[in-house]
């Protein structure tokens, strides 16, 4: 790459930039990436491992902060709706985890360059009109819910999280059912997958706060219990609903971190965590009774409120 007369050699591992060299072949910096799409984690300056910078990303994969090897914050990055950076210089990776060419104010999306000032790609879409009739449009003019890791394909965030929710719901039901020694039911399995899909698709909008994550998880779990009871023609009691809401709320509080701080490309990392949460929730729903909830949750809440009013 040549910019303003300066030549920089770039080394890639697949599509990920892993090293930069000057014109004389001297190593300038290295990058370590996570298992997901566009997931830069660490930036090493120079040939040693002592000068290290950690990169932190938001739910879209945009780098929003950096810290040194001691964990001290070194920079805060923010972006406009179409990726307009607040700082033109500094780290290589920025909006949605893409390379930022500061001197040109352009992002390199692998297949083509993108201008945050215009909110458009500078080249036509290599795959034609498969995802948009406008060959220069960026994610259908919806950068809040979409991303385009390769410059050729639009990722719809709720579709990705919905698919993850479906898988987690199905795996959670299967594993949990095996743990408690219950009879496998295809209808219950289908309900778990369906509710997981809905909850997962809603997560980007509802699970961005702790309270939202708890509410989403709790309501989804109660819905699953009620539908399963209706299909199996069994009674769904208020106490059972309380247990389901508590266990679902716990799942939401733990899993909600995915939508708050982890990029949507990290399916390989997030899915095992979601399955672990599903298993933990299943154990909780088996061992926690309505009496326990009444005594430990509602009783403690009442005591707290009573003390506050004194």
Image (spheres, rainbow, N blue to C red):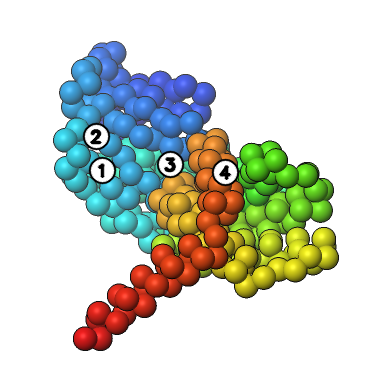
Q: Is residue 4 left or right of residue 107?
A: left
The answer to whether the residues at label 1 and label 3 have Cβ atoms under 8 Å apart is: no
Q: Is residue 56 visible?
A: yes
Q: Marks 4/3: CA distance?
A: 35 Å
Please tell me whether mark 1 sits on a helix, a strand or a loop.
strand
Give the residue at mark 4: 279
Picture coordinates of residue 57 (x, y %)? 37, 46
N-terminal-most mark, 1 or 3: 1
Residue that carries the numbered disc 3 in the rendered image: 98
Residue 217 placement (x, y as % from top left): 55, 61
Asked if residue 203 shows in the view, the reply is no
If you read the primary sequence from the N terminus, does the residue marked by circle 1 or circle 2 appear first? 2
**Quadrant that contains the C terminus:** bottom left
Q: Residues within 10 Å of mark 3 (few under 14, many from 20)?
A: many
Q: Earlier in the sequence, mark 2 or mark 3?
A: 2
Q: CA distance from mark 1 to mark 3?
A: 15 Å
Q: Which residue is mark 1?
A: 66
The residue that appears at 80% across and 48% down in the rendered structure is 185
Local SS, label 3: loop
- Determine which residue is flagged by label 2: 53
Disc on the earlier residue, 4 or 2: 2
Q: Earlier in the sequence, mark 4 or mark 3?
A: 3
Single out the residue that lies furthest toward the top: 25
Name the residue at 45% across, 52% down: 254
Residue 21 figure quarter = top left
Label 1, label 4: how far apart the Cα atoms are: 34 Å
Residue mark closest to the camera, 4 vs 3: 4
């Amino acid at each position: 790459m040549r910019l303003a007369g300066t030549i920089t050699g770039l080394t890639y591992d697949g599509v990920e930039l892993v090293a930069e060299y000057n014109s004389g072949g001297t190593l300038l910096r290295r990058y370590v990436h996570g298992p997901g799409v566009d997931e830069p984690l660490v930036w090493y300056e120079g040939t040693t491992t002592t000068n290290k910078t950690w990169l932190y990303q938001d739910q879209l994969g945009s780098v929003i902060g950096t810290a040194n090897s001691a964990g001290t914050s070194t920079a805060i990055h923010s972006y406009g709706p179409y990726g307009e950076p607040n700082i033109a210089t500094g780290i290589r990776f920025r909006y949605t985890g893409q390379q930022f060419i500061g001197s040109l104010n352009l992002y390199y999306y692998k297949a083509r360059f993108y201008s945050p000032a215009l909110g458009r790609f500078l080249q036509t879409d290599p795959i034609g009109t498969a995802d948009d009739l406008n060959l220069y449009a960026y994610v259908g003019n919806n950068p809040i819910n979409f991303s385009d890791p390769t410059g050729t394909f639009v990722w719809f965030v709720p579709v990705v999280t919905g698919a993850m929710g479906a898988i987690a719901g199905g795996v959670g039901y299967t594993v949990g059912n095996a743990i408690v020694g219950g009879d496998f039911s295809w209808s219950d399995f289908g309900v778990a997958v369906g509710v997981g899909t809905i909850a997962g698709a809603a997560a980007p909008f509802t699970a961005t706060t702790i309270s939202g994550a708890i509410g989403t998880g709790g309501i989804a779990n109660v819905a699953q219990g009620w539908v399963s009871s209706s299909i199996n023609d069994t009674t769904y009691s208020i106490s059972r609903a309380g247990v389901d809401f508590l266990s679902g709320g716990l799942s939401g509080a733990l899993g909600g971190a995915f939508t708050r701080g982890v990029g949507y490309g990290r399916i390989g990392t997030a899915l095992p965590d979601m399955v672990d949460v599903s298993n933990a929730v299943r154990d909780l729903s088996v061992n926690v009774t309505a009496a326990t909830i009444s005594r430990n949750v509602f009783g403690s809440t009442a005591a707290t409120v009573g003390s506050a009013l004194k």
